Image: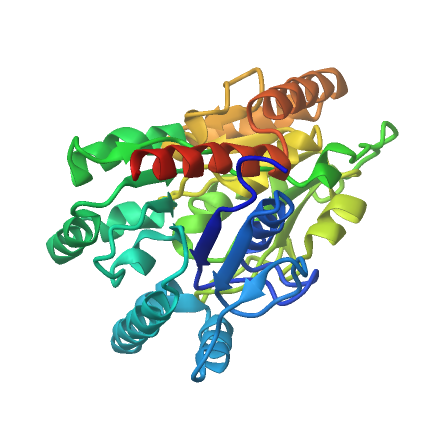
Amino acid sequence: MNEADHIKVYMTASSFPRNAKDWRAVFIRQLADALASKNIELTMWSPYGEASPLIHFDLRGGDAAWLSSLMNEGGIAHLLRTNKLKGIWSALVLLARLYSAYRRNKKTDLYHVNWLQNSLTLPNDKKPLLITVLGSDLKLLDLYPVRVAFRRITYKRKVIVCPNAEWMVEPLKTLLGGSIDIREVPLGIDKHWYEVIRRGDRSRPHKWLVVSRLTKSKLGNLFEWAHPIFSSNQADRELHLFGPMQEIIDIPSWVNYHGPATPQQLRDQWFPEATGLITLSQHSEGRPQTILEAMASELPVVASHIPAHSSFLRDGKTGLLCENIEIFNAAIKSLEAEEINVKIGREAKCWVKKEIGDWDDCAERYLGLYRILLTQNK
């Protein structure tokens, strides 16, 4: 028995994958499973899904049906983009349901909240709070009423805010003030990604992969930049796009669009035979999990030069960063040389294994912070 055995954690999240084939919020299930394996008492307020039997789901009064409907509609962020009034109403309903859930769980030792907005209706019970913050939370904090509400729930409470990427620390300090304890906590990577064996006999056409939700900001300049070297060279290379259509996107005929793919499909079928992963996202996000999974698989990454990528990809060593179409085209061609491809892939895997690790490592990082919060709260 260890020090963490008697910690009662109440975790909230508005997304949770239904099963192994569900691509949505997989990291929440992986984090919850890893924490439950540490023998803490973990109670979840989130959509139901296949998870460790050690996890207790706390859903009442129609919570399960409402959360399931919300996920089917793409979540609040998607609704705010496509139907603003419905998105605002859904956000208010979410907060109301969380308000009730927090107040009926009086025996918890601390709260672990995923996404900052889910913390805004916490009770004034002074129980410690850890918030996992992703890139979308930064945009939310630009709203003055949200900052006011956040100050209310953090008043006289021990709080640690945990962005999943180092580049987010300074913006969060500016938005939240210097009194809030902000610590980067990288999410983990499923061990299966480290076990991917890339095929050494890859032959043409070179298969390039894009794994992304289909929105304009997530795709960025993909079609414009890729057109010169993919549209007229099908014999040499192919572009394969995976992900759910969350905005109306006109996909060019030279792009092979497959719809959403499960992690298992990517690990077993696509990553082993691919030449590399492309992400030209301009979206505000922490540290993209898909990039880390590609790196763990020794699959080289070509990425847009934004903080979410440049904060951990070492250009020319663990990946290639692109600021314009000329650099992008050169990056694609250079990684089609086997020696360069293998070298960058191996460097990427070494870095991610050392700096990120797996979900067990991630759970240990959070457990350390739980102990700090509980010690400070005595």
Q: Is any atom of residue 306 visible in this view?
A: no
Quarter occupied by the N terminus: top right
Which residue is at 46% across, 52% downward?
9
Q: Position of residue 256 (x, y in %)?
A: 66, 55
* Quarter occupied by residue 66: bottom left
Comparing 230 with 31, the one in front is 31
In this image, 196 relative to 260: left or right?
A: right
Q: How many marks overall?
A: 0
Q: Is any atom of residue 36 visible in this view?
A: yes
Which residue is at 50% across, 37% downward?
367
* Quarter occupied by residue 173: top left
Q: Position of residue 378 (x, y in %)?
A: 30, 38
Q: Is residue 90 shown above or below 232?
A: below
Q: Is residue 339 shown above or below 210?
A: above
Which residue is at 58% across, 42% downward?
290
Q: Is residue 347 shown above or below 275?
A: above
Comparing 259 with 131, the one in front is 131
Q: Position of residue 103 (x, y in %)?
A: 32, 68
Q: Position of residue 72 (x, y in %)?
A: 51, 75
In this image, 33 relative to 171: left or right?
A: right
